[in-house]
Amino acid sequence: MEQRRIFAVGDIHGCRQKLDLLLDKLDWNPENEEELVFLGDYIDRGPDSFGVVETVLSLKQEYPRLVTTLKGNHEQMFINFITGQDDISLQQNGVPMTMRSYDKNSPFPVSHFQFYLSLERYYQTEDFIFVHAGLRPGVPLDLQTEEDCLWIRNDFLHSEFDFGKTIVFGHTPFREPFILPGRAGLDTGAVFGGPLTCMEVSTGRLICV
């Protein structure tokens, strides 16, 4: 059983105002060694991707042992875009909004590029596995592909496979948090007018703004 509180935050998608309100509302206390896990998709579609990354990066720099930042599919697409590997699919996934937020803060900060490259595929504790999209049923954690960790939907959502730990994930937006035995989906469509959701995972307590 987890010995300290862990908070997990769903997909932010450039909604800095909601992120600021959520952080003000949280009773997360790093002095008590409490952890904060971000499930990815910090950017795209919303108005201030730059500001969201700046906020999350500052927390990561201040509390490197306690703040975990996972990679979402939108971060991977953005890495592909800024490194010249892809420029087509991104136009359909909100990157113009992201680029506008960076154009207002040019030149592109090296610290942000390093942040994108440092994002983790998954994070596990004694009782939980945190991942952006989900996991491929029947595949050991260390053999999960990055594509599945960042993109999987139905094969994970519709499976009753027991991973041995509760999977806390984002990626697929729900009107309300998706809570089933062994599953906790925290993307509640903040960028589509829904709330930004955080869960204190050991108790299941939800904090939404």
Image (cartoon, rainbow, N blue to C red):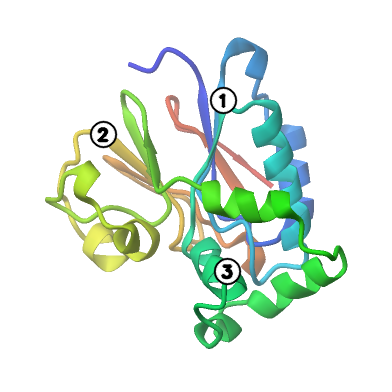
Of the image marks 2 and 3, the number of the one nearer the N terminus: 3
Q: Which residue is mark 2?
A: 165
Say which amino acid is labelled 2. Lys
Foreground tag (2 vs 3): 3
**Which residue does the image show at 56% across and 84% down from the upper left?**
87
**Is 1 situated above or below 39?**
above
Front-most of 17 and 56? 56
Q: Nearer the viewer, residue 70 or 172?
A: 70
* Nearest the eye: 152 or 140: 140
Residue for badge 1: 66
Which picture quadrant has residue 103? bottom right
Query: Mark 2–mark 1 contact, CB under 8 Å?
Result: no
Residue 34 shown left or right of residue 173 in the figure: right
Q: Amino acid at mark 1?
A: Leu
| Residue 10 appears in the picture as rendered | no
Q: Is residue 22 left or right of residue 77?
A: right
How far apart are labels 2 and 1 at the CA level? 20 Å
List the residue tagged with mark 3: 78
Question: Closer to us: mark 2 or mark 1?
Answer: 1
Give the residue type that dot 3 points to. Phe
